[in-house]
């Protein structure tokens, strides 16, 4: 299992070892010890989600108030998605930057997004099935959205896929609007919370 930090600090691409034979393939898609060695803290598990999307469905950018926020460990078990991490932490040197990981059934990578990061994904195939482990449970009054088509963020979506957004995501504020409304986490709040998770 290899961990590679993305250009958004706190987001990691995880590439598992695949063991295949004529029966199929086996892999470990999450393992606590390598996770703690790479990130320096544990991943508390409070909820596990599964999302099935047709080609073109764009979910996000979603995030939760910090503390406690919601860290996510995400993989795709059917189809393929372009998964996006966005730095929305006010005061971060990389505020507004994004990076992506292709999650599919070929390399079977995962992505980890720390508390305080924005998360989105675009389904590249019909019935793309994403499963993710969450550090906190869903709390609607603490959950927020940023428009994933915000030109100021400038995510490069595949040109051959027409994004299909929910009404809620379509109406979401831009990154600048969310910042001006005081809806975004600060880098200091995120750092303080992560320090509390250290073993």
Image (cartoon, rainbow, N blue to C red):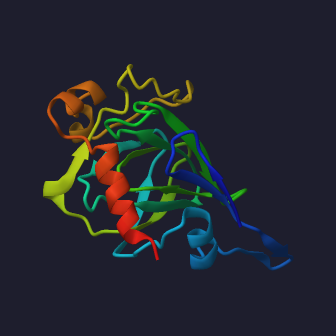
Q: Quadrant of residue 178?
A: top left
Q: Quadrant of residue 163?
A: top left
| 23 w.r.t. 160: above or below | below
As drawn, the residue found furthest toward the top would be 151
Number of numbered callouts drawn: 0
Q: Residue at x 41, y 26 (%)?
A: 153
In the image, farthest residue toward the right: 22
**Residue at the spot 26% in from the left edge and 55% down from the top edge:** 66
Find residue 77 and report its horizontal and vertical position in percent.
Answer: 57, 64
Residue 171 visible in the snapshot: no
Q: Residue at x 23, y 34 (%)?
A: 172
- Residue 1 pos. (x, y %): 71, 67
Q: Taking the image as drawn, is residue 173 in sight?
A: yes
Tell me if 62 is positioned left or right of 40 in this view: left
Is residue 65 left or right of 131 when viewed as pictured?
Answer: left
| Nearer to me, 187 or 87 | 187
Give percent across and percent down for residue 6. 59, 44
Q: Position of residue 120 (x, y in %)?
A: 42, 44
Q: Is residue 192 above or below residue 149?
A: below
151 lies left or right of 169: right
Question: In this image, 154 relative to 66: left or right?
Answer: right
Q: Nearer the viewer, residue 107 or 54?
A: 107
């Amino acid at each position: 299992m290899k961990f590679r930090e993305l250009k958004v600090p706190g987001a990691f691409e995880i590439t598992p070892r695949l063991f295949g034979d004529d029966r199929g393939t086996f892999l470990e898609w999450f393992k606590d010890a390598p996770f703690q060695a790479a990130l320096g803290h544990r991943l508390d598990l409070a909820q596990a989600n599964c999302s099935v999307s047709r080609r073109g469905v764009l979910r996000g950018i979603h995030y939760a108030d910090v503390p406690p926020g919601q860290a996510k460990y995400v993989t795709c078990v059917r189809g393929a998605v372009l998964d996006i991490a966005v730095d929305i932490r006010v005061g971060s040197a990389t505020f507004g930057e994004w990076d992506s990981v292709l999650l599919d059934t070929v390399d079977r990578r995962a992505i980890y997004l720390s508390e305080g990061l924005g998360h989105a994904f675009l389904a590249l195939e019909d019935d793309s099935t994403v499963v993710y482990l969450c550090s906190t449970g869903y709390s609607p009054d603490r959950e927020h959205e940023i428009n994933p088509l915000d030109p100021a963020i400038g995510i490069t979506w595949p040109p051959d896929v027409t994004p299909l957004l929910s009404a809620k995501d379509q109406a979401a504020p831009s990154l600048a609007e969310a910042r001006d409304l005081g809806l975004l986490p600060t880098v200091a709040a995120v750092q303080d919370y992560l320090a509390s998770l250290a073993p």
